[in-house]
């Protein structure tokens, strides 16, 4: 039986990402909102922040966003990594603009590689995790920076939804109504994937999963698949095998 809890929400999310009518047309996610161009989510929370839900802890919020509790405490002037958070409290969950200069591992490097003829060519996307398709099917909704936070992949109801990479389940439940049955997997300190609008869930929180392991059954509207690097939503398509 799946444990159902209200936690950041993944990926926003995590959510980062309020999806009401469309699976991918809002910036509300399992990680609430994340560092996108300045905007307001449909919940009224600025991008890069999260509104605390009942039952949330600083540690669980940090885990869902791929951050350290002590960093989130520092960004919000809290007394420490074990500081109490209250429902309705709005927390910064993404680094301030001046925090660090490293390029997120799933983001293209900021510079472009010069071609032999002197014309700058787009730099390849660097990845810290090799991803596989969670399901194979038509792309019903594509990623749009600043407008959506993932893609929607179609397929027959009941088809297995598989983990895109090995990792640990940090959320499995239905506590975020806009996502329906949702699974969020943390792969490392930078990378999180989320799988929303499933039918039946096959994993529980804290489960260790391997790449390709079934984690859910597809629902009637396809699966919403999201990838986050350092708390930022990135387009999953360039990271998936052709």
Image: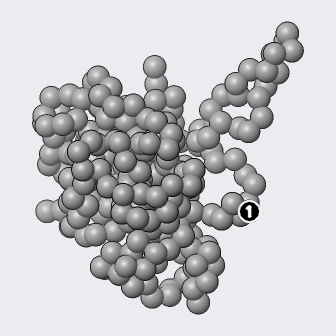
Residue at (32%, 55%) from the top-left corner?
Answer: 18
The total number of labels drawn is: 1
Which residue sits at x=34%, y=68%?
7
Viewer-proximal residue among 206 and 28: 28
* Residue tagged 1: 98
In the rendered view, does 58 fall on the left or right side of 126? left
Q: Is residue 173 left or right of residue 187?
A: left
Quick check: can you spot residue 159? yes
Q: Quadrant of residue 151?
A: top left
> Quadrant location of the N terminus?
bottom left
The residue drawn where x is 29% and y is 50% is 19
Residue 22, placed above or below residue 73: above
Residue 31 horizontal side relative to residue 202, left or right: right
Residue 128: image location, x then y, percent: 59, 43
Locate residue 203: give its quadrant: bottom left
- Which image quarter: residue 108? top right
Residue at x 30%, y 79% (from the top left corner)? 54
> Where residue 56 appears, x then y in whole percent?
36, 77
Q: Position of residue 24 (x, y in %)?
A: 34, 41
Query: Considering the numbered disc 1 on the image, is that residue within a helix, a strand or a loop?
Result: loop
Q: How crowded is the residue under tag 1: few (<14 C-alpha within 10 Å), some, or many (20+)?
A: few
């Amino acid at each position: 039986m799946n444990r159902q809890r209200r936690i950041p929400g993944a990926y926003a999310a995590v959510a980062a990402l309020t999806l009401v009518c469309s699976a991918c047309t809002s910036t509300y996610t399992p990680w609430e909102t994340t560092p996108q161009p300045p905007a307001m989510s449909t919940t009224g929370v600025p991008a890069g922040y999260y509104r605390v839900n009942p039952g949330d802890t600083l540690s669980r919020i940090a885990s869902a966003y791929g951050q350290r509790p002590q960093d989130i405490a520092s960004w919000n002037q809290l007394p420490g990594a074990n500081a109490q958070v209250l429902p309705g409290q709005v927390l910064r969950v993404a680094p301030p603009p001046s925090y660090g200069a490293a390029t997120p591992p799933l983001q293209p490097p900021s510079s472009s590689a010069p071609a032999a003829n002197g014309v700058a060519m787009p730099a390849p996307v660097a990845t810290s995790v090799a991803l596989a398709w969670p399901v194979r099917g038509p792309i019903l909704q594509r990623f749009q920076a600043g407008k959506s936070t993932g893609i929607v992949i179609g397929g027959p109801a009941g088809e297995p939804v598989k983990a895109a990479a090995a990792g640990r389940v940090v959320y499995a439940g239905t506590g975020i109504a806009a996502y329906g049955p949702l699974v969020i997997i943390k792969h490392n300190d930078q990378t999180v994937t989320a799988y929303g609008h499933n039918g039946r869930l096959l994993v529980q929180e804290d489960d260790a999963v391997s790449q390709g392991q079934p984690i859910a059954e597809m629902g009637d509207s396809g699966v919403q698949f999201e990838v986050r690097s350092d708390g930022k939503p990135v387009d999953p398509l360039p990271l998936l095998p052709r």
